[in-house]
Amino acid sequence: MFLRVLLLLLISLPSLPALAQSGTQGPVPAQAAVNINRRQLEATRLSTEAVKLDGNLDEPAWREAQIATGFIQNSPNPGPRETHPTEVRILYDAALYVGAIMHDVSLDSIPRELTQRDNFGNSDFFGILLDTYHDKLNGYGFFVTPAGVQLDARYSPAGGEDWAWNAVWESRTALQGTDWVAEMRIPYSAIRFSSQAEQVWGLQLMRNRRSTR
């Protein structure tokens, strides 16, 4: 089955006042505002070249993939653009691949405590949350720290945020200059989704920079 994955990126939405400042005249209907603000990221399908999970995004497929960037800070002060840029790319074939580069100022600014699984500790982290049925009710979260610690959770109206849920997936991280890189491989067996040939999922991308909270 040909699987085309279109992910709706929800993390970096501009505020509604910005629409008025950019020249929108009169009130914006609620549905129109949602459509204007929604960002999309199309996962790039791998052809013949495999991706080596090593924390280095050096394969041509990574360079050709669409980039999600321009994140919006939500803590401690919600609203401003990220100060330290983040770049995320998504590929797929028999699994979903996520590559993220977290730019920083120095390695000393990247806490990386080695902890047990599902424990953030005193560490930065990167995470992807997937609403695979696009119902805004159920989802899966996959997180990794610069030390390579994995965390995962399942989200549902009945169970809330369930950190006791553990999936089988792979990740590698690397320190490169003043940045750190996360690379993930999430097999489809770890998640559930519809049988539609074209998949449209809700998506959240999250970066935590511990030194500035």
Image: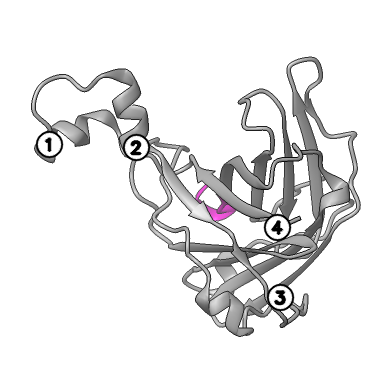
Q: Which residue is mark 4?
A: 2
Distance between mark 1 and mark 3 Cα atoms: 41 Å
Q: Say left or right for 80 vs 159.
A: left
* Numbered circle sitting on residue 37: 2
The nearer-to-camera label among 1 and 4 is 4
* Numbered circle sitting on residue 55: 3
x and y percent of residue 146 in the render? 70, 64
Q: Amino acid at mark 2?
A: Asn
Q: Which residues are magenta?
A: 206-213
Say what secondary structure mark 4 lies in.
Answer: loop
Say what secondary structure mark 2 lies in.
Answer: helix
Q: Which residue is mark 1?
A: 21
**CB atoms at circles 2 and 1 under 8 Å apart?**
no
Q: Judge by depth and name the residue closer to the eye, 1 or 142.
A: 1
**CB atoms at circles 1 and 3 under 8 Å apart?**
no
**Point 67% across, 72% down: residue:** 46
Q: Say which quarter of the image contains residue 2.
A: bottom right
Give the mark, 2 or 1, whose residue is nearer the N terminus: 1
Q: Say left or right for 9 vs 3.
A: left
Q: Say left or right for 58 vs 31.
A: right
The nearer-to-camera label among 2 and 4 is 4
